[in-house]
């Protein structure tokens, strides 16, 4: 019986926050705008790192680290705006019909951008390039499976 209480006590804050997150969107359009805004901010900072990785911009360790930190921080935000009743925007119906796959993809991306952030903080250009490629692949995978073309 104690294990049951421990599990409930552990999950209660998460369930409460999830419920609040979904409740904050009065209309589906609000959720769509929110998640698109979060993805726009991430894409902007990710693109700046990409320009460095591709040799289109000079390597500045501090700038890369700053942009990687932004991407890592924002990467946890859009998912709360994909709750029930928030269908639409650029998201395909599979976000909701195959939510387990979508959730797994979001978690994979968040891990990849956390690894990019770690590499960027180290300043090791080779590690940054490798981590950037891995993070980009997770973004592409999610776009391929869950975003309208």
Image (cartoon, helix red, strand yellow):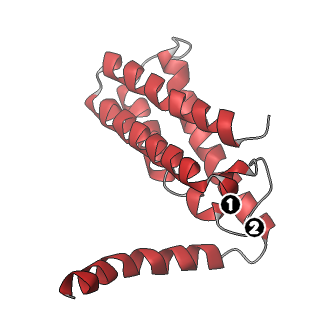
Q: Position of residue 113 (x, y in %)?
A: 43, 39
Query: What residue do we see at 55% from left, 37% from top?
Result: 45
Query: What residue do we see at 78% from left, 47% from top?
Result: 90
Mark 1 nearby-residue class (10 Å; few <14, some 14–19, many ≥20)? some
Query: Which image quadrant for residue 9?
Result: bottom left
Mark 2 nearby-residue class (10 Å; few <14, some 14–19, many ≥20)? some
Q: Note whether 54 is above or below 140 in the view shown.
A: above
Instruction: Return the residue at label 1.
Output: 34
Instruction: Return the residue at label 2.
Output: 30
Q: Check if mark 2's residue and mark 1's residue have beta carbons within 8 Å.
A: yes
Query: Which image quadrant for residue 32?
Result: bottom right
Q: Where does the N terminus fall, quadrant-wise? A: bottom left
Q: Position of residue 95 (x, y in %)?
A: 67, 52
Q: For this view, does 99 lie left or right of residue 68?
A: right
Q: Secondary structure at mark 2?
A: helix
Q: Position of residue 85 (x, y in %)?
A: 74, 69
């Amino acid at each position: 019986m104690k294990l049951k209480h421990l599990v409930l006590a552990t999950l209660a804050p998460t369930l409460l926050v999830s419920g609040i997150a979904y409740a904050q969107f009065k209309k589906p359009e609000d959720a769509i705008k929110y998640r698109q805004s979060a993805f726009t901010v991430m894409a902007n900072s990710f693109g700046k790192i990409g320009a460095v990785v591709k040799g289109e911009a000079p390597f500045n360790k501090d700038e890369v680290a700053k942009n990687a930190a932004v991407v890592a921080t924002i990467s946890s935000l859009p998912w709360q705006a994909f709750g029930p009743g928030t269908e639409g925007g650029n998201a395909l119906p599979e976000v909701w019909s195959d939510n387990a796959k979508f959730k797994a993809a979001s978690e994979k991306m968040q891990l990849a951008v956390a690894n990019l952030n770690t590499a960027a903080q180290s300043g090791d250009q080779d590690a940054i390039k490798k981590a950037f490629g891995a993070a980009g692949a997770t973004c592409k995978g999610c776009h391929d499976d869950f975003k309208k073309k």
